[in-house]
Image: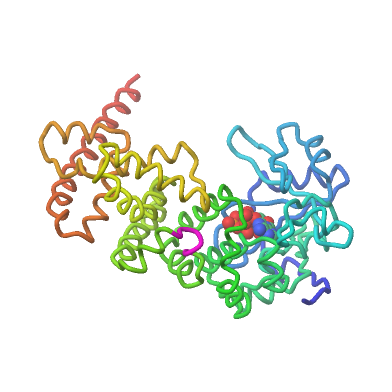
Amino acid sequence: MKTSLEQYSKEDHGIYQDNIDKDVIEISDALISNGYQAFLVGGCIRDILLGKKPKDFDIATDANPAEICKIFKNSRVIGRRFKIVHVYTSEKKYFEVTTFRSEASKKNHSNKFKKSNGMIKRDNVFGTISQDAFRRDFTANSLYLDLDSEILHDYVNGINDIKNKKLKLIKKPAISYQEDPVRMLRAVRFESKLDLELTDDCREAISKMAYMINNVSPFRLFDEVLKIMHSGNAVTGYKKLLKFNLFKYLFPYTHDIMEKNHIYDDFFVAALKNTDTRIKDNLHVNPSFIYAVFLWPYFKKLEQKYSQKNSLGVDLAFQKTIDSQAKYIAIPNFFQSTISTIWSLQDSFLNLSSRNIQYLTNLHKFRAAYDFFYIRSTMDDNLKIYADKWHEIQKKVVSKKSNQDKKRYGKRNRK
Ligand code: ATP
Ligand code: MG
């Protein structure tokens, strides 16, 4: 890996202040006027260079978390493995400010901060900007923009990789993925959503090291899988998870069933298409939906097994599905209850009595359960006739609701 610093002026990198949130410029000014360095770094720079709108803006500084909090009254330190500061600019809006870190793997820190399997467990050894540049994952994610001088600092040849549309790990793939196997999921996400292609060595290493994803905390995997599925490119992300061998380690029970029954692959693609469309249309997406989809094949298998012997078979099947999966991906209780509702309502869609229609359409989770049923019906002709009827019913519900909303707003306007 090339280690020399390249600097690019505004004319060369082409990032202008109107690409950047005003609040970020204020945070950066406050750090600089207090004698610290401040750089924009990570996905925001990468996305602007690729002509995309950044999702968020992250700031890196040489101020430590306590010093950052001293400058910004409205801030708090979060994280244990990796301490960062959230600086609030309004009640709901905040930015991540991160202190430069050095490699946790260096010399005397090696044993203290690494698990026996080579994973980094804590990463709070502060350092300089150049050290910080080398502890990041991909070269495209390691570009630093100084908002004061407007010079872009590149220690890892990231600008050229972006120009050549390459997604490249800073370290050797075997070392990088071992230090943090989540980088394999980040590789899938970035390749799916950005117009960048993983270098051959970075791609090949994933298939060989995919099993290491099970070294990651099941809670962290819940978030990381969701980030892929809610990126607006879930179909591509899912296909890459399969191709790189990762899906098998994330959803082992589902994967086992899929090897025998290919219909579920179509079901997943149909559901993920629906999620991608909702994201593009700026509609709400519920995390439970994705997990209800991926765990459905295993739940159905267990339901069939337990229901033959036990009147509480459905409940047993639900609990066993969630508990077995929790060793790999842990689903928070709140989302478990929505999954249970979506699944338990499926049979109710076979009842078209007016009483049942009224009952179902008044339920809070009607929409999620209906979407799920509708997607199932595209794979199963027996459900199609019901799905078509429910399609008409839900259209009426939506239009009734929008009339009610209009009336409500109308009243407010008259006040
Ligand atoms: P986006 O926010 O668009 O999903 P991002 O690259 O900004 O993408 P974040 O999770 O916001 O992703 O992380 C911010 C930056 O922190 C990254 O760009 C990268 O430099 C660094 N980073 C995040 N996760 C890791 C990791 N697991 N290993 C090394 N560096 C990381
Ligand atoms: Mg980001």
278 relative to 346 in the view: left or right: right
Residue closer to the observer: 189 or 209: 209
Q: Quadrant of the C terminus?
A: top left
Farthest residue, direction top: 415
- Residue at position x 29%, y 37% from top? 312
Q: Is residue 174 visible in this depiction of the protein?
A: yes
Above or below 170: residue 254:
above
Q: Measured along the vertical axis of the image, is residue 412 above or below residue 25?
A: above
Q: Position of residue 333 (x, y in %)?
A: 47, 37
Q: Is residue 249 magenta?
A: yes
Name the residue at 48% across, 57% down.
231
At 51% across and 51% down in the image, what residue appears?
A: 329
Please indicate, yes or no, whether residue 18 appears anywhere in the rendered image: no
12 or 283, which is in the foreground? 283
Question: Which residue occupies the extreme left position in the image?
Answer: 353
Residue 411 position, x and y percent, is: 30, 23
Q: Is residue 168 left or right of residue 106?
A: left
Q: Quadrant of residue 214?
A: bottom right
Which residue is drawn at the image coordinates 46% and 36% (left, top)?
Answer: 334
Q: Position of residue 164 (x, y in %)?
A: 62, 79
- Principal secondary structure, stretch drawn in magenta: helix
Magenta segment includes 347? no
* Ligand 1: image quarter: bottom right
Of residues 27 and 189, which is closer to you in this image?
189
Residue lying furthest front in this view?
309
Q: In the rendered view, would you say 192 is above or below 284? A: below
> How many badges with numbers are in the image?
0
In the picture, the quarter occupied by the N terminus is bottom right
- Give coordinates of residue 252: x percent, y percent: 45, 60
Span highlighted in magenta in the image: 247-252
